[in-house]
Image (cartoon, grey):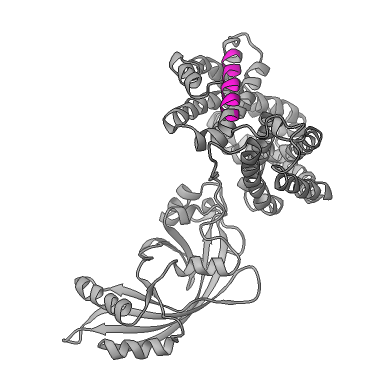
Amino acid sequence: MIGEELLLPERMTVSGAGEALAGRLDVEDGRHREGHRAYYDTFDGLLHGAGLSLVHADGRLSLLERDTGALRATLSAPAPGKPLFAADLPPGALRDALLKLTDVRALLRLVRVHARERLIAVLDGEGKTVVRLALVQATARGSARAASTLRPRIRLTGVRGYDKARRRVQSTLVDELGFKPADEPLVDEAVRVTGGVPGGFPSKLDLPLRPDQRTDTAAAVVLHRLLEVIEANLSGAIDDLDSEFLHDLRVAVRRSRAVQRELKGAFPPQELARFRAEFRWLQQATGDARDLDVHVLEFDAMRARVPEAMRGDLDPLLGVLRARRVKARRRMVAALRSERNQRLLSAWRELLDGLESAPEGDRPDAARAITEMAGERIGKVYRRMVKMGRAIDEASPAEDYHELRKKGKELRYLLELFGAPLYPGEVVKPMIKTLKGLQDVLGRHQDREVQIELLHALSGEVGRADGGEAALMALGALIARLAEDERAAREEFAGRFAQFASKEQRRLVKETFAS
């Protein structure tokens, strides 16, 4: 049962429910009340996943527990008129709780509910209130103008010290009057009937693969799901609701490209070549905007690397980064809205829909079992990474680290998309963990390399801005600190790589992903 909410029996009206209650229980009718509530969550349902709801009602923004309605934190505030970021709230319990859960994700309005409630008290033999009931009639509005009517329900709220009475009342409602435990909270029903998805659009992939599936069938399952992620995040990336829309879109594109490369023998070669070129274009078209998103988001962390007295001098750099981000986003939005992108996603879906039934003459791996194919590719990419990593030493150029990082992404996508659903978790999970540790170091090394290159490239613009002379001094100090961190990442590399390429890890890979 969801909380203490019950649905009215079919064909029973709210007024009929009131009469039925009066016929079975000693009740006292109370006041009627009505009001509006707006519910908020991130696109991927972070609050929902944590068992919480963010509600605006009666001039207050409140964080509530979904199952009990208990108040976690509240704040007097007008209804948000645009995407709400926890960091923009005033300091306090609500800001702290939301920031911990949502980080950089925007809180978006899910639905607006208008509810009329008839309050009823259930009394004992002495006339004391032992249970409180509320008969609820509600309508919901999403992005569309038309309101949708929700199923009428009754809400039970117990009174402390009268648990036995609450259970007795609940039994009367269910067993004698035919009320049914609610299959979803009112807010989830409101989101669903207005066209939304209760719980949001999850960023984590749930892939129902079977070991005996054909490779082309399994590839189509994975790539269909990744296409859904791309399409679901498209409008949020265009509208710049928060930076994670573009991030999730790009990750789905990268994963799709990895599957195209690693399972190329399951696809018609000529068509695959065309789609690989188009997905490369899509990746490139969104790259600058994402890079500048990261630079702006992490600016405070970069600023903190220079002496405190110089931190304010870096403001011109932030202005230049923001200006460049605006231009990059303009180019990206044009690409995402283009007919080229629309044709790409539509044609890609069409290919995936007909992949299994396509002629197999030029698709040598199409009918192979996915476990055989995935195991072969995972083993091969792992061995290639071990060979590449062993060739790296302190004198190796930055490009060698970068190439190893790219190959690591390929392996991680194979493990996440195919390894996790098909192979033992006691092998795959530790392998992903050591790979993440290696990728963190490689990523830090690459990030510092890119940041240093960018800052050198921006020095002319920064120097011409107001306060440019002081900004250039601070920029030099920042570049020096980033170079130190890049060197530190190189020093950490050997230890991380040793874990990833250990004798035990190599043995497990050979035994699990035999090829």
Residue at position x 70%, y 25% in the image: 453
* Residue 173: quadrant of the picture: bottom left
- Residue 327 position, x and y percent, is 78, 44
Q: Is residue 59 magenta?
A: no
Which span is picked out in magenta? 373-387
Depth check: 466 or 482 in front?
482
Residue 497 location (% of width, % of height): 51, 17
**Left/right of residue 61 with respect to residue 82 in the rendered view:** left
The answer to whether 121 appears left or right of 64 in the picture is left
Question: Is residue 315 shown above or below 58?
Answer: above
Image point (51%, 47%), residue name: 103
Q: Is residue 82 above or below residue 175?
A: above
Look at the image and tell me in which quarter the C terminus lies: top right
Q: Is residue 466 visible?
A: no
What is the chief secondary structure element of the magenta stretch? helix
Q: Position of residue 477 (x, y in %)?
A: 61, 24
Pinpoint residue 428: horizontal percent, then vertical percent. 47, 30
Residue 386 in the magenta stretch? The answer is yes
When asked about the image quadrant of residue 26, the answer is bottom left
As drawn, 449 above or below 53: above
Residue depicted at x 41% and y 55%: 93
